[in-house]
Amino acid sequence: MRIPVIQKIIAILWPSFLMAGVATVLFFTAFDPALILAHTAFADVPRLGAYTVGFFLFWLLTASSCLLTCYFQRPCDRAPGAS
Amino acid sequence: MNKPESTAPRPANRDAGADEGMYAKHQKVYPREVHGVFAFWRSTGVLVLLGLYYGLPWLRWDGRQAVLLDLPERKFHIFALTFWPQDFFYLALILIVAALTLFFFTALAGRLWCGYACPQTVWTEVFLRIERLVEGDRARQMKLADAPWGARKLLIKATKQTLWLVFAAYTGLTFVGYFTPILEVARGLVDFSLGPWESFWIAFYSLATYGNAGFLREQVCIYMCPYARFQSAMFDKNTLIISYDQARGEPRGSRKRGDDHRAKGLGHCIDCTLCVQVCPTGIDIRQGLQYQCIGCAACIDVCDQVMDKMGYPKGLVRYTTENALLGKAVRILRPRVLFYAALLLAMVGGLGYALATRLPLELDVIRDRNALFRETDGGLIENVYTLKILNMDDRPHRYRLTVEGINNLQLRMHRDQIDVPAGEVMELPVRLQVDPGELSARSNKIAFTLQDRDDPTLTVTEDARFLGPAPGTR
């Protein structure tokens, strides 16, 4: 059965979006970005900016994982070594 | 439709292959407008929920925004309550209560959430109404879609898109207004002083609204909604679902009004396909329970009108249960429902208790890491600590600090009063001194107690260790 392209795109972007949201909430509940960034070059970044960048980094990470899952899910036509 | 498992995907009533490709190629569903009892309740739900969403951020409480999940300040204000990151536990409890509520209502009455309260349904409804306002009814919309591009079509489509975008933009603004004070956001928009991050999230949320409610629509329910996939686990034969009464309706077929359908060998379904035309997800309810069905009851409303016109009893498509359709007794209070209800009550009770007994005060004790202990000139053993005092209340407090665990333990600090302003953290260095003769071990358990000067119920105690030389080494 063929899977519509839109479903494939959603399968990568959507679950990763949800999990990036969860990760962002958990991470920034435990760690205050203002304290983490205080002694770095990014000390001027406001909290809202840190949350935003953090969220998109998490999304990049989770989306990569979803992408790999989708990639490895493709059927293997031939087993390695089979003629 | 036999077991909950039978909610597995079935082909919807669309051309085969219509789903292939991006939504550009996806065959658009043009839901026909419908009136009736359930349409009324859905409209009411939409109005109430949208009113709440757009109105709540403007509500004031005690000189501040009543509901403000202030991310920049890391404090959540919900009416009289203020939550700190340390209160994450309450957020988790609230989420569990929300999930259990969803389970309870799903077991009782199927997809009530999807049809009446889900944001996807609510905003799609608004976008559909704007579309109907600009383009006309279903037939006109389809005609316009088929018409060649010209000045008139361009004007109509541009008007619709503009209205959609304006509405979406206001939705985005309101969304950001829950996380940063909405007055500042509105002011920032007027004089172009809005911060880049706020602007970004307004744009992001606006585009998400526009895409989900304007274009993706039912595809969100089909491809993106996790609840649509696992809800069948909460269904049983006594769950209220929208069903076509096959025994009554079949064999379907067209006829003239006043024809004796029994003579023609027909059931009550006149095969007018109105139930398919009103369906926002484009399915045919007569094929049985399908996971695409969001339970909006539009097909019930439209079919009841047809039954009225034909002089047949209403309810050919209706809210019913599988057991009722099979002529068996329907049990509303069954173990599954009672179990969800009991769990829900317990969690709500727990949340209420936790909130009622929540202390707006927290104490952290951090030992000085540089020295384990030191000996004063007077021969006393001294340990140094930093106390972090969080006043999570909306008013200032004056506290009294005591310590116990070792006899004659003396508390020394550089101030006489511990005054912490509303919503602030105080770091308080303290020194503890004791005669070495009082120590019975290298490491002794002690406890700091912080108490409000006026309100003795506002008390927190935090354990710590007091280190000294091994007993007998002196």
Image: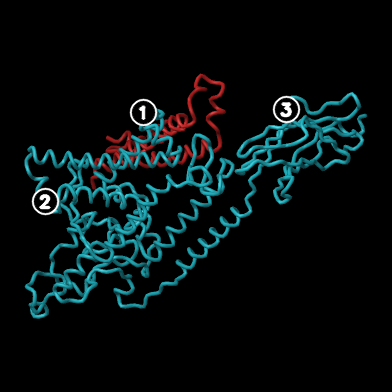
Chain colours: A red, B cyan
**Disc 3 to disc 1, C-alpha distance:** 49 Å
**Pointers 1 and 2 within a single chain:** yes
Query: Which of pointers 3 and 1 lies earlier in the amino acid sequence?
Result: 1
* Residue position marked by numbered label 2 in the rendering: B140
Q: Position of residue B297 (x, y in %)?
A: 27, 63
**Which residue is at the front of the view, B24 or B169?**
B169
**Which residue is at the front of the view, B142 or A17?**
B142
* Residue position marked by numbered label 1 in the rendering: B192
- Disc 3 versus disc 1: nearer the observer: 1
Q: Chain of mark 1?
A: B
**Disc 1 to disc 2, C-alpha distance:** 41 Å
Query: Is residue B98 placed above or below B171 in the rendered structure?
Result: below
Tell me: B348 left or right of A64. right
**Which residue is at the front of the view, B77 or B101?**
B77
Question: Which corner quadrant of the image does residue B250 belong to?
Answer: bottom left
Question: Which corner quadrant of the image does residue A68 belong to?
Answer: top left
* Picture mark count: 3
Quick one: SS at disc 1?
A: loop
Q: Amino acid at mark 2?
A: Arg
Q: Position of residue A2 (x, y in %)?
A: 23, 45
CB within 8 Å, label 3 to label 1: no
Q: Position of residue B9 (x, y in %)?
A: 27, 55
- Disc 3 versus disc 2: nearer the observer: 2
Quick one: SS at disc 3?
A: loop
**Which residue is at the front of the view, B309 or B21?**
B309
Tell me: B409 left or right of B28. right
* Residue position marked by numbered label 3 in the rendering: B369
Q: Position of residue B411 (x, y in %)?
A: 82, 35
Query: Is residue B423 placed above or below B79 in the rendered structure?
Result: above
> Which residue is drawn at the image coordinates 9% and 45% (left, top)?
B146
